[in-house]
Image (cartoon, helix red, strand yellow):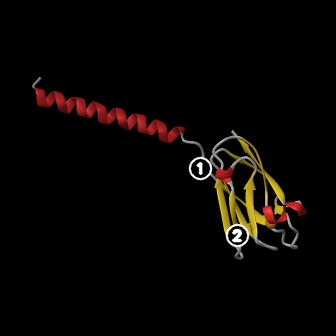
Amino acid sequence: MNFSSFVKKIGLAIASLLFVVGSLFITAAPASAETVTVKMGSDSGQLVFAPKVVTIKVGDTVKWVNNKAFPHNVIVIDHPELSHKKLAQKPKAELESTFTEAGEFSYYCSPHRGAGMAGKVIVEG
Ligand SMILES: [Cu+2]
């Protein structure tokens, strides 16, 4: 076997190996991530997150949407990287966080914390 046909064989072997490994990754990938919507302010205008508690899976996203009695924000306790300190001022304004670790994440709205506007995201592994 001369050198160039050897290189071609190795190249083919690597290409097919990469193909096999690549397909393994595709089949091993978890079901596509989902987005769960939480309203900020109930339809009747109460200072609450609705629903108050959501259960999601690792990799899913929570989208908080301005509904009533805004401005609101989302402060996830001990998780500034998941928080949205800046107030959502406009109708239908959206805040989003993707949860990449399992656990329970309590959060509140800072202008309305005193009124009990708080919620929880339960992230299942
Ligand atoms: Cu609020």
Question: x and y percent of residue 108 in the render?
Answer: 80, 57
Location of residue 59 with respect to 23 vertically, above or below: below
Q: Secondary structure at mark 2?
A: strand
**Residue displayed at 54% across by 41% down:** 29
In the rendered structure, the answer to whether residue 69 lies left or right of residue 59 reads: right
Question: x and y percent of residue 102 in the render?
Answer: 70, 40
Q: Secondary structure at mark 1?
A: loop
Residue 8 falls in image quadrant = top left
Q: Ligand 1, what quadrant? A: bottom right
Q: Looking at the picture, tell me which residue is in the foreground, 124 or 47.
A: 47
Question: x and y percent of residue 92 in the render?
Answer: 70, 73
**Residue displayed at 30% across by 36% down:** 15
Q: Nearer the viewer, mark 1 or mark 2?
A: 2
Q: Would the CB of label 2 be found within 8 Å of ligand 1?
A: no
**Which residue type carries mark 2?**
Ala
The answer, for residue 53, to whether it is visible in the render is no
Per the model, the C-alpha gap separating discs 1 and 2 is 28 Å
Residue that lies at the very extreme toward the left in this rendered image: 2
Question: x and y percent of residue 36 in the render?
Answer: 70, 57
* Circle number at residue 32: 1
